[in-house]
Image: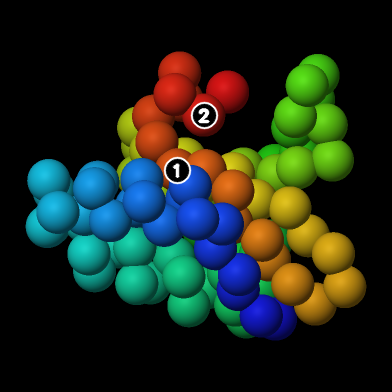
Amino acid sequence: MTIKPDKVFLKRANKLLKKNPQLKKAYAELYDKLSHNPFDSTLHTHPLTGELKGKYACSLTYELRIVFRLYDDIVHLLDIGSHDEVY
């Protein structure tokens, strides 16, 4: 699968990783797993409802989520942050 991060996602991810450099390894591993199988059980990927219907979320850490959309073979990364920030 191809990963395409949104501009907003990149900005938020860069800010988050700069502030928390210890997350870089987990972020790289998640990115790799998403490119191979966005429904890998370790990602805890789940469909969203309500205003975010049609999108999915997976876990970077216990507190941090990544929201993405799937179409064809593209994982379009939309947002990253805490549960309250992205939902």
Q: Nearer the viewer, residue 82 or 61?
A: 82
Q: Nearer the viewer, residue 73 or 59?
A: 73
Residue holding disc 1:
80
Q: Residues within 10 Å of mark 2 (few under 14, many from 20)?
A: some
Is the Cβ of the residue at disc 1 closer than 8 Å to that at disc 2?
A: yes
x and y percentages locating residue 27 in the rendered image:
34, 63
Q: Amino acid at mark 1?
A: Ile
Q: Nearer the viewer, residue 9 or 27?
A: 9
**Which residue lies at the image location 70% right of the left edge and 44% below the top edge?**
56
Q: Amino acid at mark 2?
A: Val
Q: Secondary structure at mark 2?
A: helix
**Which residue lies at the image location 45% right of the left edge and 18% below the top edge?**
84
Res 86 label: 2
The answer to whether any part of residue 12 appears in the image is yes
**Which residue lies at the image location 65% right of the left edge and 51% below the top edge?**
68
Q: Secondary structure at mark 1?
A: strand
Q: Where is the N terminus found, in terms of image quarters? A: bottom right
